[in-house]
Each structure stands twice: as C-alpha cells, then as structure tokens.
Amino acid sequence: MPEALNETELAAALAELPEWRLEDGALRRDLRFADFVEAFGFLAKVALLAERSGHHPEIHNVYRDVTLRLRTHDAGDLVTERDVEAAAAIDAQLSG
C-alpha cells in the first residue's frame, strides 16, 4: 500500500508543482482553455496518462474550465508520491 506524504514531503512536492495546491487532502489544479474542444483534447491526453499509470485523477469539466484532483485511495485518500508523479506528468502535457 502506498504511503501518504508527510508535511515536509508535501511542501517539497508543492514547491516543484507551483500550479498545484493542497485542498481537502488532495492536490488540485484549475485550468482554463480557449474553448471546450481544447479542454476536452487536454482531458483525452490526461485519460491516456492515467490509463498507462493505473492512477486516475478526479476530473471536473464545465465548458472550458477543468479542475483536476489527485489523491491515492489506497492510502486513505491522501497524497502520495504517485499523485506527485501524476501531477508532473499532467503538467508536461501542458507544456509539450
């Protein structure tokens, strides 16, 4: 079972992920795209990443606005290294 990150590890992870924040025990990132098609295209990339890694974000999408939340259910719905890795991979999709 994955281990939840402690406060020091979470702080270090968030320093490397400036667009993400800790909210209600999860990593959260809010995004706004030009339109629904761009938002949905991004979400398709996230879906492929999630399937490859076997770790799926919580996704909320309304028109061009997307909210992603990451936490590990097997660790009591807390943030683990898997979530940090997923956040970094998601960020890479935005820059690449």
Image (cartoon, rainbow, N blue to C red):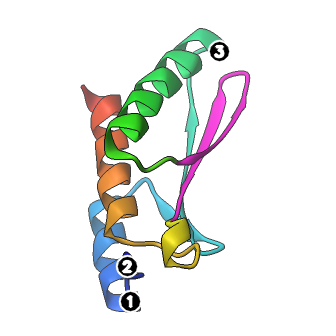
Asked if the residue under mark 1 is in contact with the one under mark 2, i.e. CB atoms within 8 Å, the reply is yes
Up-down relation of residue 53 to residue 69 (above or below) = above
For mark 3, what is the residue? 36
Q: In front here: 6 or 49?
A: 49
Q: Quadrant of residue 32?
A: top right
Going by the picture, which residue comes out furthest to the front? 1
Residue 67 forms part of the magenta stretch: yes
Q: Which residues are magenta?
A: 57-71
**Where residue 92 sits in the image (x, y, percent)?**
27, 37
Say what amino acid the circle numbered 3 marks: Phe
**Residue 58: percent from the left, percent from the top?**
61, 48
- Give the mark nearest the N terminus, 1 or 3: 1
Vertical side of 7 occupied by 35: above or below: above
Cα gap from disc 1 to disc 3, whole angstroms: 37 Å
Secondary-structure class at tag 2: helix
Instruction: State which quadrant residue 4 falls in.
Output: bottom left
**For the residue labelled by badge 3, is the local secondary structure a helix, a strand or a loop?**
helix
Q: Which residue is mark 1?
A: 6
Q: Which residue is mark 2?
A: 10
Question: Which residue: 32% across, 31% down?
Answer: 93
Q: Local crowd at mark 2 within 10 Å, few (<14), some, or many (≥20)?
A: some
In which quadrant is the C terminus drawn?
top left
**Amino acid type of the residue that numbered disc 2 sits on in the rendered structure:** Leu
Q: Could you tell me which residue is drawn at 36 percent across and 51 percent down?
A: 86
Q: Residues within 10 Å of mark 3 (few under 14, many from 20)?
A: some
Q: Main secondary structure of the magenta part?
A: strand
User: From this viewpoint, which residue is outermost toward the top?
Assistant: 37
Residue at the (62%, 35%) spot, across then down: 66
Q: Amino acid at mark 1?
A: Asn
Disc 1, SS: loop
